[in-house]
Amino acid sequence: MKLLLLLILYAIALSAAFKRSGLRSRTASSSGATGRRPTRVLIIGASGGTGRQLVTQALERGYVVTAFVRNPSKLQIVHPQLQIIQGDVLDYASVEAAVRGQDSVISALGHKRFFYPTRILSEGTRNLLRAMESQGVLRFVCETSLGIGDSVGRLGIYYTLFIIPVVLPFYFWDKTRQERLIAASKVEWVIVRPGMLTNGKKRNTYRHGTTVGSFIWTVRISRADVADFMLNQLTDDTYLRSSPGVCW
Ligand SMILES: NC(=O)c1ccc[n+]([C@@H]2O[C@H](COP(=O)([O-])OP(=O)(O)OC[C@H]3O[C@@H](n4cnc5c(N)ncnc54)[C@H](OP(=O)(O)O)[C@@H]3O)[C@@H](O)[C@H]2O)c1
């Protein structure tokens, strides 16, 4: 009994230590800034939750944005620097046409077909990488999730022991394949692994790095703050070819 209590206290202490770890961002990060500022960015999954935040914030930052969507009527953002391209990541021709002429690509691709095996994330990303390599587009920032690769367990015990193995096993397998393809590619990649997403406001303050997350509690972050962090990765080399987690 005493041993069990000690173990629980140890796990809580460990989790608290991990919760405090990681770097904190208040504003657009700059420590590893390249000085290069790509102006044209292609946003994949632009009609989704994170995607719409990416489009809005990229326009606010002055980028010329191309939104890649299956259904343009879902985006509902109008701006002189916004171009909308209709396509499907599983259709290579539409992906290549969208990638042509871009300086960088950001992906917030996702779907809700959880309960049977799919390869939408991995095959879609394979098409993106192929198009980027053939067009010479270098920077790729891709949203996946805490709980993958060396971040296994960091989405908290509820996700680790229940949601991922019971509800999302196919989805996480596909995300794992997606990450492996990115890591094996020749592009300048940053994989961004958020905690559980909320539609809350942008706080501009969040933790990021390879040791963020918790082995006990479910960690969260708003899609707005994830978009902020992802856009920072377009001009910052701190996390180049690595997979930082991000959460509040
Ligand atoms: N929910 C969470 O708590 C959580 C936590 C960590 C990580 N994540 C991950 O973060 C990412 C973004 O999540 P989110 O909830 O912000 O996104 P979301 O609202 O699910 O949006 C996903 C986007 O991907 C697009 N898409 C799907 N299939 C496509 C295809 N074949 N071709 C082109 N576009 C396609 C969707 O288009 P349509 O609008 O046409 O469907 C939509 O724009 C996902 O990968 C998700 O798994 C989520």
Image: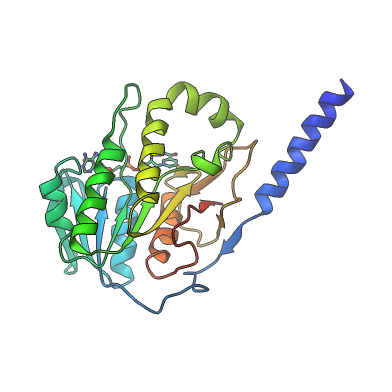
Q: Is residue 16 above or below residue 60?
A: above
**Residue 8 is drawn in which quadrant?**
top right
**Quarter of the image where one finds residue 119:** top left
Q: Residue at x 32, y 59 (%)?
A: 187
For residue 71, above or below residue 208? above
Q: Ligand 1 sits in which quadrant? A: top left
Residue 226 quadrant: bottom left
Residue extending furthest toward the right? 2
Q: Nearer the viewer, residue 112 or 124?
A: 124
Percent across and percent down for residue 219 are: 57, 43
Q: Is residue 238 left or right of residue 76?
A: right
Give the residue displayed 26% in from the left and 45% down from the top: 126
Identify whether 169 is placed above or below 128.
above
Q: Is residue 43 visible?
A: yes
Residue 178 lies left or right of residue 165; in this view the side is left
Q: Residue furthest bottom?
A: 35
Q: Is residue 44 above or below residue 102?
A: above
Q: Residue at x 84, y 31 (%)?
A: 6
Q: Is residue 76 visible?
A: no
Q: Measured from the top left, where is residue 139 in percent x and y?
A: 33, 63
Name the image quarter holding the N terminus. top right
Picture coordinates of residue 149, whole percent (x, y): 50, 41
Q: What colour scheme has been applied to the protein in the rendered image?
A: rainbow
Q: In this rendering, would 106 be left or right of 9?
A: left
- List x then y, in percent, for residue 76: 20, 52
- Tell me which residue sits at (16%, 69%) in the image: 80
> Tag count in the figure?
0
